[in-house]
């Protein structure tokens, strides 16, 4: 360094040019550093903003269960195809709770296992039997399940081209021409005991009160004095059998009966 300065003319050293150049370089370097330091908080705020956006999205998913439930989205089409739940399952539970407060009928709570599904002894298949005494008027099941346009041997007709594949134990309730349960159709389709049911007794309802034409007719084994023998649907009953069931048929069967009567 000293050797380099020795080569500089004395007039340049006395003028202070080198000192000025040094100071200028230092000021420029410190100014750039200061500018970079001033930029750092801005970059940090950007990262914080991204993190907060992600957090807000997570918070939304947690707070709003309708956005994602489990690993799949619920859309309007899926909800409309899941019949007789109301808008949601919670809506149905709220409606049932309101109905319980407005009526004196005994209602089956989900934690009360008063019925069981067991194999039938006389034929292949299963049935629903009472585990305890069930009084007349006791609510047993609410109809809900997948909606189908075509009937199957297990569906229940709820409109002219709409059939419900029942969920739960209701799907195992068999037919009888002298049943101990029957449906009530408002506001939802609910199965009630129509008389006292003893422990071990099978629960049954009359399929012809809900089916206009059965998808798969079958032979009845109820051995009742008024047994129709072959269960094919309400359409195939004789006038006397139709009159006996007219008070308890579903709105769908009533509508089709009126259409049939008007065309005859």
Image (tube, rainbow, N blue to C red):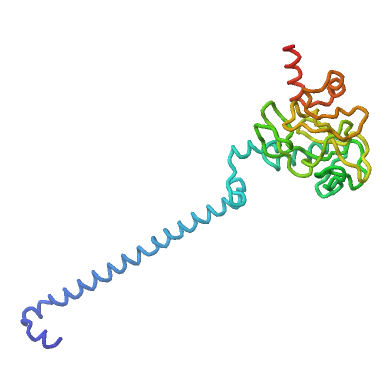
Quadrant (top left, top right, bottom left, bottom right) of the C terminus:
top right
Residue pictured at 24% horizontal, 71% vertical: 27
- Residue located farthest toward the bottom when viewing the structure as drawn: 3
* Quadrant assignment, res 18: bottom left
Give the image location of residue 126, x and y in percent: 81, 45
Left or right, 199 with respect to 39, comes to right
Give the image location of residue 231, x and y in percent: 81, 30
**Closest to the observer, 48 or 194:** 194
* Quadrant assignment, res 236: top right
Give the image location of residue 247, x and y in percent: 85, 23
Q: On screen, 51 above or below 104?
A: below
Give the image location of residue 79, x and y in percent: 63, 39
Q: On screen, 110 above or below 257?
A: below
Q: On screen, 197 above or below 32?
A: above
Residue pictured at 79% horizontal, 33% vertical: 218
**Closest to the observer, 216 or 27:** 216
**Closest to the observer, 125 or 132:** 125
Label count reads: 0
Quadrant (top left, top right, bottom left, bottom right) of the N terminus:
bottom left
Residue pictured at 60% horizontal, 53% vertical: 62
Q: On screen, 70 above or below 1?
A: above
Left or right, 136 with respect to 92, comes to right
Left or right, 35 with respect to 3, comes to right
Residue pictured at 39% horizontal, 61% vertical: 43
């Amino acid at each position: 360094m000293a050797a380099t300065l020795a080569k500089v003319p004395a007039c340049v050293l006395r003028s202070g040019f080198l000192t000025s150049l040094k100071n200028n370089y230092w000021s420029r370097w410190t100014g750039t550093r200061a500018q970079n330091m001033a930029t750092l908080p801005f970059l940090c705020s950007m990262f914080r903003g991204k993190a907060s956006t992600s957090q807000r999205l997570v918070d939304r998913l947690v707070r709003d269960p309708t956005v994602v439930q489990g690993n799949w989205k619920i859309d309007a089409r899926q909800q409309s195809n899941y019949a007789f739940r109301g808008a949601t399952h919670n809506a149905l539970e709220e409606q049932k709770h309101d109905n319980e407060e407005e009526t004196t009928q005994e209602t089956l709570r989900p934690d009360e296992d008063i019925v069981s599904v067991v194999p039938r002894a006389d034929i292949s298949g299963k049935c629903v039997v009472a585990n305890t005494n069930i009084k007349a008027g006791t609510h047993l099941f609410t109809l809900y399940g997948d909606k189908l346009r075509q009937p199957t041997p297990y569906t229940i007709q709820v409109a002219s081209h709409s059939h419900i594949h029942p969920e739960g134990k209701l799907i195992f309730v068999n037919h009888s021409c002298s049943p101990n349960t029957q449906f009530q159709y408002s506001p939802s389709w609910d199965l009630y005991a129509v008389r006292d049911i003893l422990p071990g007794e099978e629960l049954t309802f009359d399929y012809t009160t809900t089916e206009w034409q059965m998808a798969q007719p079958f032979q009845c084994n109820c051995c009742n004095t008024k047994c129709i023998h072959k269960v094919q649907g309400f359409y195939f009953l004789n006038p006397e059998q139709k009159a006996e069931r007219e008070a308890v048929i579903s709105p769908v069967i009533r509508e089709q009966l009126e259409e049939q009567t008007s065309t005859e």
